Image (spheres, rainbow, N blue to C red):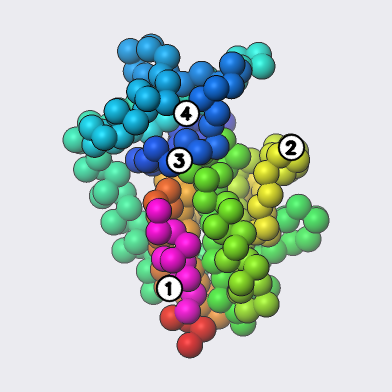
Amino acid sequence: MNLGLKIKILYCILFIGFQAFSQISFDDPLTVIKAPDGKVLKKADMQKIMKSGKQFSMYSVKKGDTTVYYLEYKTKDEIGKKKLIRSNLKSTLLNKPLSSFSLSNMDGKTINKTKLLGKVTVFNFWFTGCVPCIREMPELNELVNEYEDKVNFIAPTFNTKEEVQKFLTKKQFKYDILYDSKQLNELLNIESYPTHIIIDEKGVVREVIFGANLGIKKQLQTGIKKLLE
């Protein structure tokens, strides 16, 4: 496994807000959240951090039955680098045909670019340990309910089929999940999670939207409606 993939697995490389912690129980004795200095954080501590305006990322490590979440504050250089990465990704992908790919979904069916043509398609690049990805899922499921007859909803993840199956025993995700998507993620230079890409019925990228924000459902709806008009 290369270093880049290790980073992707360990880190949810996003600046996230307090609502991203809605999936974490602060009262669960098997859940621990630690600051960079090692201090165990309570809910009130997190509220203070959010009010301070500090930007941060986090990753989780399983230690027996306990899940430990580690916060890392972002420097100005890291914030600038993240903005540049996102800007470059948009300029690389927007208004260009999506790269060809072929992956399997959870039912064992092969999904490729050709099969998606003729409909608008919304991609959600995610992984099972990404807290902001999980936070968005209820809203994404609502989008599926609203547009499932008109839009393809595809969710590539570099996780294995077994890892996804285990995840789905606890969380509902109505997108068509494509597992082992490492090559596609690297081909498209996906480095932040969640990342949403909307392509038109001809397979051309029309929107690149970065998740973990309060307006994600509305943003995706706006992008979808433009292409369905």
For the view shown, which residue lies furthest in the bottom direction? 229
**Percent from the top left, x then y, of residue 72?**
35, 26
Q: Are marks 3 and 1 in contact (CB under 8 Å)?
A: no
* Residue 74 as seen in the image, left or right of residue 163: left
Which residue does the numbered mark 4 point to in the structure image?
59
Q: Residue at x 44, y 59 (%)?
A: 216
The N terminus: image quadrant: top right
Main secondary structure type of the part rendered in magenta = helix
Q: Residue at x 51, y 18 (%)?
A: 32
Identify the element where label 3 is drawn. Answer: helix
Q: Residue at x 42, y 26 (%)?
A: 43
Q: Are marks 1 and 4 in contact (CB under 8 Å)?
A: no
Q: Amino acid at mark 3?
A: Ala
| Marks 2 and 3, how far apart at CA | 21 Å
| Marks 3 and 4, how far apart at CA | 13 Å
| Marks 3 and 1, how far apart at CA | 23 Å
Identify the element where label 1 is drawn. Answer: helix
Which residue does the numbered mark 3 point to in the structure image?
20
Identify the element where label 4 is drawn. Answer: strand
| Marks 4 and 2, how far apart at CA | 19 Å
Which residue does the numbered mark 1 point to in the structure image?
222
Is residue 224 located in the magenta-colored stretch of the structure?
Answer: yes
The residue mark sitting in front, 1 or 2, is 1
- The residue stretch that appears in magenta: 214-225
